[in-house]
Image: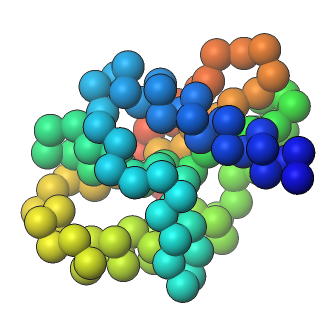
Amino acid sequence: MLTKYKGYLGEILASILLMLKGFSILERRYKTACGEIDIIAQRGHLIIFVEVKVRKNSEKCYNAIRNKQMKRIRTASEIFLRQKPEFLHKDIRFDVILISNWSIPIHLENVNI
């Protein structure tokens, strides 16, 4: 339960970071049959699909990024775009936000998946 609570707080912190960068949050915890996208946000013509990782330190955050998870996010993003055709002609990007205790969140943009 504590891990779920930390994840939820991490998503809130990541959403605030994105809003400070000028993004509007379209969805949080967007669920599909193939998995969940933590945050979907928009700034202008750009839609980003964000995975949030919360760990004790930044090294554990980096190590928590898995290719399988990022592929799941790509598949879930395709479902989102099919369900929301108004976003089909927007630019898309896949990001990761790393949050570790007592540090400023790290926003990795355009993570290769």
Quarter assignment of residue 5 = top right
Asked whether 46 or 31 is in front, the reply is: 31
Asked whether 55 or 110 is in front, the reply is: 55
**Does residue 88 sit above or below 38 in this rendering?**
below
Q: Which residue is drawn at 40% across and 54% down?
A: 27
**Does residue 104 sit above or below 19 in this rendering?**
above
Q: Which residue is drawn at 15% across and 73% down?
A: 85
Residue 69 image offset from top left, x and y in percent: 64, 66
21 vs 50, left or right, is left
Q: Is residue 66 visible?
A: yes
108 vs 81, left or right, is right
Residue 81 image offset from top left, x and y in percent: 27, 72
12 vs 3, left or right, is left
Q: How many numbered dots are placed on residues in this image?
A: 0
Quarter assignment of residue 53 = top right
60 vs 111, left or right, is right
Q: Which residue is drawn at 87% across and 31% down?
A: 56
Q: Residue at x 44, y 38 (%)?
A: 109
Residue 88 image offset from top left, x and y in percent: 16, 68
